[in-house]
Amino acid sequence: MRVVLAEDLYLLREGLIRLLEAHGFTIAAAVETGPELLDALLTHRPDVAVVDVRLPPTLTDEGLQAALKARREIPGLPVLVLSQHVQQLYARELLADGTGGVGYLLKDRVFNAEQFIDAVRRVAAGGTAMDPDVIAKLMQSTSRRSGPLQRLSPREREVLELMAEGCSNSAIAARLVVSDGAVAKHIANIFTKLELAPADDANRRVLAVLTYLNGTAERAR
């Protein structure tokens, strides 16, 4: 699996390179500026991009803007953002096209290699990997007064939030202290209430998560 990595801090960039390579990834390019990132993404068209938000030359949002520009040229390009802060606008822009393959992790909340590598693989496969704090930020100032999201019960919203984090059915069951069967029933109800047509369940999971996060972000503008 080929990765384009963008991180301006030398030690962190080298550490990520070694971590990814140790888990079987190929580093197509490792860059430190926004313009270099855009060029690398368009040139290499990787399986996934791992991107810091703030890159030179401005150290504002260069990394994410480059990723979003590349995603417009390469629809569905999987992007995993690594940031020190929850930036609501950045998350909204990532989710705006309604496709999978998106993630947003906070650097100081990545506690082990397995967590990070799992997120990279999940995003590369077209799934989502959202930090709970990012989800919470998107939920702030959200009324949910209209649309299909209003139909979800409080428990179904809990299940959907955990799906957004990338939890499996068994992991959701463990977190909520319910049976796997109960989780499966909640997920089936979510698909129905969000009017997701019968299809591959993995795809419907991603669509449900993006519907939820997109609706949340839209109301928080």
Image (cartoon, rainbow, N blue to C red):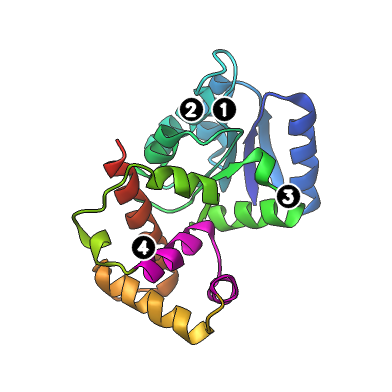
Is 127 magenta? The answer is no
Q: Nearer the viewer, residue 33 or 39?
A: 33
Mark 1: amino acid: Leu
Res 147 → quadrant: bottom left
Q: Is residue 121 above or below residue 181?
A: above
Residue at numbered disc 3: 111
Q: Secondary structure at mark 1?
A: helix
Q: Which label number is shown at residue 215?
A: none
Q: Classify residue 95 as left or right of residue 144.
A: right
At label 3, counting other C-alpha atoms closer than 10 Å, the crowd grade (few under 14, some 14-19, many 20 or more) is few
Res 8 → quadrant: top right
Proximity of marks 4 and 1: CB atoms separated by less than 8 Å: no
Can residue 143 be seen here?
yes
Residue at numbered disc 1: 37
Residue at numbered disc 2: 66
The image position of residue 32, as x and y in percent, is 65, 23
Residue, x 33% and y 42% (percent of image)?
Answer: 141
Residue range highlighted in magenta: 154-176
Per the model, the C-alpha gap separating discs 2 and 4 is 27 Å
Mark 2: amino acid: Ala
Is 159 magenta? The answer is yes
Per the model, the C-alpha gap separating discs 3 and 1 is 26 Å
Which of label 4 and label 3 is nearer to you?
A: 3
Does label 3 or label 1 sit earlier along the sequence? Answer: 1
Does label 2 or label 4 sit earlier along the sequence? Answer: 2
Q: Classify residue 46 as left or right of residue 219.
A: right
Residue, x 54% and y 20% (percent of image)?
Answer: 35
Does label 1 or label 2 sit earlier along the sequence? Answer: 1
Mark 3: amino acid: Phe
Per the model, the C-alpha gap separating discs 2 and 3 is 27 Å
